[in-house]
Amino acid sequence: MSRSHLRGLGTVVVAALVATLSVGAPAQAAVATGTIAGTITGNGAPASDVTVYVSSADGSFNDATTTNASGQYELTGVPVAESAYRLTVEPRGGPRQYIPGKIDEEAATLFSVAADGRTVADDSLLPTGTITGRFTDPAGNGVSAWVSARPFDGNGVEVGLNTDVNGAYTLNAWPGTYRVEFFFGNGRQWAYGAATEDRATPIQVAVGQTATVNDVRIGTGTITGKLTRADGSPAAGFRVGAESNENFGYATTDDSGAYQLTDLVPGGYRVYFEQSSGVRQWAPQSHGRDDARVYDVTAGSSTTIDERFLPTGSIAGRFTDQAGHGMGDVQVQLSGTDDFVTAYTSADGDYRIDGIFPGSYQVSFYHWQTNLSQYAYGKLTQEAADPITVTADQTTTVNDSRLPTGTVRVTAKDSVTGAPISRFSASIGNTSGEATSGSAILSDVPIGTHTVSAYAAGYRYEDRAATVTVVAGEQSEVQLTLSRLATITTKVTDRATGAPVAGMCVFARPVKTFSLPDGCGDLTDSTGAISLRVSDPGTYNLFVLPKGNSPYGAQWVGLDGGTGDQGAARRVTVEAGASKSVPTIKLDPRGVVTGKVTGTDGLPARDGSVGIVGPDVGAGVDTRYSPVAADGTYRIDWLGPYQWPLQFEAADHAIQWSGGVGNRLNAQLVPVGVGTPTVFDYQLKQGATMTITVPGASGWDRAVIRNSVTRDPIAVVDSQTFAAGVQIPVIGSQKVKIEFSGRWYGGTDFASATLVTVPRSGNVQIVYPAS
């Protein structure tokens, strides 16, 4: 809510004051600006219809324009700044790049703009290949669709555009292997005629070459029906959705409650009807997706699904400050449901949420501008929140007031020397502060005991640095102890030439353990040098992860060159706050390994992937997997030419490392060839079955099973049915530890968790104690 220092003055006085300010105050100085302009070419010719984006590094300025027939562009009114602007070039139907001629955003030049100056930034489009063709119906008529080409391994740049009136399209893409997707209405398919992504045909793109990809729209089906309210009257204006494993469709009910979902690709669909609150009811008459019926949609068919909304209740109330005044624009959110249910208070603090299924919930109140975050009634956490019961056809009143607040003064010291740290940041919940001269003041902190988080440059981020108790209207004091980061320095070069290699991602992992980062914060500079910060003292291995288009292969850093076996990698021991220099890292060209993956029945594996890390439990864009195609084949072309353990994952089979083991360090090592690909076929082993039962579990939860030696996740399962028991295939002859939604089986952390032996075959029963 805005607060005016003029509030409380009489209307006449305010008008007179405003008039006086208007006459006497000087005009606000105009922001100094300049111009960014240039010419974009491709293959030596002007590149027209190319979009050029200008964005500041801090996100405060964004603008765009398009090149003309001469390849020229110009953006005026760009605020003056030094080395602040990144320029992105994106041709229509082609991959984006960054001026000057960079694939990676981090490598882009940052341009300056002077007052009334003209900054010239020219660029030439990087070499590409072409994917072209037509998308038609079975009669040969062009179909309107969005066509996209996505890198087969999930890394790189996706390109896309709409077909023309004849269904024709032309895409430009960097060299590589792609999936081509056609998105039309509610339907989508992959070339050629594939209803699911895993059955897409790999399309090879080479510089200067054209790949022709014509495809025919596969037959689709329809779901139609009528939606009524609980009293039987038509439910108009409600969203209806259909979801399969790969596809989806949406519609809105008309005045009579009728709807029609068209262009649905054949498959099994669950259908939901969304209440005004955002709560979804699944057909037929179900609260949750897992309880919904799967409706089979076939080409040319029409399935009728009539649905009546189940009875619902409402929650309404008022949120006020400590003085009893209503607080506006406070977000009110319902917990205890799989759906996102939220509302905002009016200026008087009133709110109402309709269309809630009967049950027990928690209600939270959030307002970022005033650091408000609490649960009804007057609680700081969801665990402490009071249960709110909703009854059909009734309104539950939930009024609450903002908790009293106090202030916290935070100081910090070095864990080794005890010296004060002058500059750091600290936070309690949504409240944060910066210390520039030794202390940070955190205001508007709710009463109660809180955990303080902190970070300082060169120190480890502490999520739970200390606790502090806040008293209403008073200032509390807390001192934090922060630990210095260790530093590992090295240099990356081309093994053959000795030339430095820039833009390489290098990161450290504790011995035996391996995971890939969410992106990469540390890249080698133009001299190949890099300085890595390490949070904890100990012994580490280094891993180099080139970008997807790099000519170099990934590697564990060995004693003299790369290796694919972490067990043979160089060990680097660092102490807290110390710096350790590592000999030069030498890169080799990337190689290729291909093969065919089959199940225990000898047929091609379904929904499979091959990689070098465990299942995804949070890794981001740099997670590397190669999909298994419909015929069981796979291709990995980004590893260094060494021997690697490979992980195989497929439907109805246990996740396993090459050789059929659960411990990555005991896996069969697979050579990767340069020039001539290595062929490695693999038949999956069945493994054992583990049943995890968690009494009292409700809603979506996650179980993660980890190898006890490497900590690699060898199974990750999300389900709503852990209370009844969930069966999970696990490769045998290994010892594991189990985590269920943050609760370790038999312990409080990985170290203390119970060691569970998985036999080569058979069943393992795991029953969690009731919480």
Image (cartoon, grey):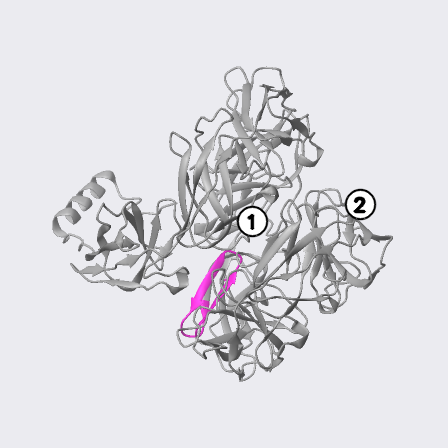
Q: Which is in the foreground here, disc 1 or disc 2? A: 2
For this view, does 368 lie left or right of residue 704? left
Q: Residue 68, how many percent across, how many down?
A: 23, 46
Three-letter amino acid code at disc 2? Gly
Three-letter amino acid code at disc 1? Gln
Q: Residue 541, how many percent across, how many down?
A: 61, 75
Which residue reaches farthest left?
A: 23
For this view, does 37 lie left or right of residue 7? left
Which of 323 and 234 lies nearest the eye of the viewer? 234
Q: Residue 713, how many percent across, how many down?
A: 69, 59
Crowding around mark 1 (Cα neighbors within 10 Å: few <14, some 14 to 19, many 20+) is: many
Quadrant assignment, res 735: bottom right
Residue linked to disc 1: 374
* SS category of the residue bearing label 1: strand
* SS category of the residue bearing label 2: loop
Residue linked to disc 2: 725
Q: Residue at x 22, y 43 (%)?
A: 14
Quadrant assignment, res 396: top right
Instruction: Tell whether label 2 touches label 1 (CB within 8 Å).
Output: no
Magenta stretch, residue numbers: 423-440
Considering only order in the chain, which callout, 2 or 1, is on the residue closer to the N terminus? Answer: 1
Q: CA distance from mark 1 to mark 2?
A: 34 Å
Q: Residue at x 36, y 46 (%)?
A: 2
Q: Residue at x 73, y 65 (%)?
A: 750
Q: Quadrant of the N terminus?
A: top left
Residue 69: in sight, yes or no? yes
Which of 93 and 540 lies nearest the eye of the viewer? 93
Which of 315 and 659 lies nearest the eye of the viewer? 659
Residue 228: in sight, yes or no? no
> Which dot marks residue 427?
none
